[in-house]
Amino acid sequence: MKILFYLILFNLTYSYYSIIQSDSKVEYSGRHPMHAFTGKSSSIMLLSDCDSNRDKCDLKFTVPVISLNSGNDNRDSNMLNYLEAFSYSEIILNIEDFIIMEYNAESIPCTITIHGVTQTINIPLTVKEKSSNQYTVSSTFSILLEEFDIPRPKLLFVPIDNEIRIKVDLLIKREEP
């Protein structure tokens, strides 16, 4: 608990950008031959380390695995088990040397860490300036469970699809100096 407190304090003190969680979410969806499923989280944190002009930043987005919720307690418990949530408690996406400006579905290189495995991927990213100190950010991309050493859960001995689709909608606020 102390660690979470210090992370939040550090984020509020030293971060140039923050996420407005009430207007932000990460959704994931997957398929099984018998049904589709979707879950989401609004517990997204952002740490930013920017140059003196705040134009070029290293961004670190984190989502606690335990915050992912599909609305089905059995499915969520199973997901926490397969993701080994107590060993790998966060999903982390890093973007380095990101220039803060408007983008329209540009392909941005980043690293994503899930289940303790880090992969380099390119994600489409749309950034729009909402006001002088707020930006909307959106992206939709897919990951493969096998690339993160995550066994595919089964229902009636049939595994879910390997592909998980991720949709991100964020409202980011630029903090005043």
Image (tube, rainbow, N blue to C red):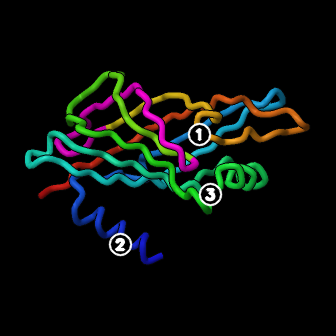
Pick whichever of labels 1 and 2 is earlier in the sequence. 2
Q: Residue flagged by tag 2: what amino acid is it?
A: Tyr
Residue 13 in which image quadrant = bottom left
Q: How crowded is mark 1: few (under 14 residues within 10 Å), some or many (20 or more)?
A: some
Q: Which residue lies furthest to the bottom in this view?
A: 2
Highlighted magenta segment, given as a residue range: 115-135
Residue position for label 1 = 148
- Look at the numbered discs 3 and 2 and tell me whether their residues touch, using CB distance below 8 Å: no
Determine which of the numbered discs, if any, sits on residue 67 in the image.
none
Location of residue 57 in the rendering, given as x and y in whole percent from the top left corner: 22, 43
Q: What element carries label 2?
A: helix
For residue 124: magenta? Answer: yes
Residue 168 visible from this viewpoint: yes
Pick whichever of labels 1 and 3 is earlier in the sequence. 3
Q: Residue flagged by tag 3: what amino acid is it?
A: Ala
Residue 53 in which image quadrant = top left
* Image quadrant occupied by the C terminus: bottom left
Between the C-alphas of marks 1 and 2, the distance is 29 Å
Residue position for label 3 = 85
Q: Foreground mark, 1 or 3? A: 1
Our reading of the magenta stretch's main secondary structure is strand
Residue 11 in which image quadrant = bottom left
Q: Residue flagged by tag 1: what amino acid is it?
A: Phe
Residue position for label 2 = 6
Q: Which residue is drawn at 26% across and 45% down?
A: 58
Q: Residue at x 24, y 57 (%)?
A: 15
Q: Residue furthest left?
A: 53
Location of residue 37 in the rendering, given as x and y in whole percent from the top left corner: 71, 37
Residue 58 vertical position relative to residue 100 in the rendered view, above or below = below
Location of residue 93 in the rendering, given as x and y in whole percent from the top left corner: 42, 43
